Image: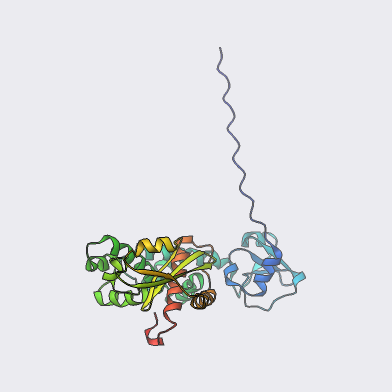
Amino acid sequence: MSPEPPSPAPAPAPAPAPTPIDEDSAWDAFSRRDRLADGRFVVTVRTTGIYCRPSCAARRPRREHVRFHATPEAARAAGFRPCLRCLPDQVARDRLAVARALALLEEADTVPALTDLAEAVGYAPHHFHRLFKRATGVTPAAYARGLRNQRADIALRHQGSVTAALYEAGYAAPSRFYADSETRRGMTPGRWRRGGDGAAITWTMIATPLGQLLVAMTVRGLARLAFDEDAARLAEHFPAARIDALGDGDAEAIRERIATLACPDPALPIGARRIAFVEAVTQALAARDQPPERQL
């Protein structure tokens, strides 16, 4: 019996269609010069023959002269040229540089100098500082502090001593670690490590674009900021503390302050966005009752 002919190879799956652009939302973002919309689409202007970032600083054309394209390539294919003022083709390079910097910060054992970080991603330090803060809401140094604080929390729970924990987290000296703990843990590292050990902690949940955020504090500072946690999880972290819900007035004041913070670029990984946002919240809440020279 002759062998059967081989079955034909299955056809490759079609590429996913690009997400349709909601023109009303796109026009609104363009009208507001929304930087977070940069990279999601470009704006073409029929009367000038150019395409721009949504945040372009140029005067806004009439609505009927504007169209939206998903990518710069699509705009060029339609016969438009890039704006020389806002350089829309630069957006992808900028995002890659920020993403690379985030990875370098996560890999670093200590906080790298801005000049070294900027050089590693191919930008001048001053320009990259602005670019990073615009994308994440915090500076590279602040993001690195947020990472270090996250590592310190983990190290405090698993290391045999506070000294071992602070060096594992990347602190160069105990003094900085103890000073940070006043603001970022609301108690000494030893008490925090012992599950709160008699501390009084109040908490509330705040809805944010990145999810529900647990905010817990003592009279001395923040005790915990975390996504995907609730009062039950807080009690697990601090079994030796007295824990109560924050009063409505204080909770609303915190909610209003957090609502003023810009969210990181949605094109960045969700984990990095949450670290940056938590650090921005830390700075905003720590600044409420401190003079400028003591703010983070």
Q: Nearer the viewer, residue 107 or 288?
A: 288
Is residue 80 rendered to the left or right of residue 194? right
Picture coordinates of residue 111 (x, y %)?
A: 34, 71
Q: Nearer the viewer, residue 25 or 92?
A: 25
Is residue 76 rendered to the left or right of residue 63? left
Picture coordinates of residue 234 (x, y %)?
A: 40, 64
Quadrant location of the N terminus?
A: top right
The image quarter in which residue 66 lies? bottom right
The image quarter in which residue 71 lies? bottom right
Q: How is the image coloured?
A: rainbow
Quadrant location of the C terminus?
A: bottom left
Identified at 26% across, 77% down, the residue is 175
- In the rendered image, the residue lying farthest to the top is 1
Is residue 51 rendered to the left or right of residue 256? right
Picture coordinates of residue 164 (x, y %)?
A: 23, 65
Is residue 7 rendered to the left or right of residue 292? right
Q: Nearer the viewer, residue 42 or 149?
A: 149
Residue 269 in view here? no
- In the rendered image, the residue lying farthest to the right is 64
Identified at 48% across, 63% down, the residue is 96
Give the total of numbered labels: 0
Q: Nearer the viewer, residue 257 or 89?
A: 257
Above or below 238: residue 184: below
Picture coordinates of residue 49 (x, y %)?
A: 71, 69
Above or below 8: residue 192: below
Identified at 41% across, 79% down, the residue is 286
Identified at 63% across, 54% down, the residue is 18
Residue 11 in view here? yes
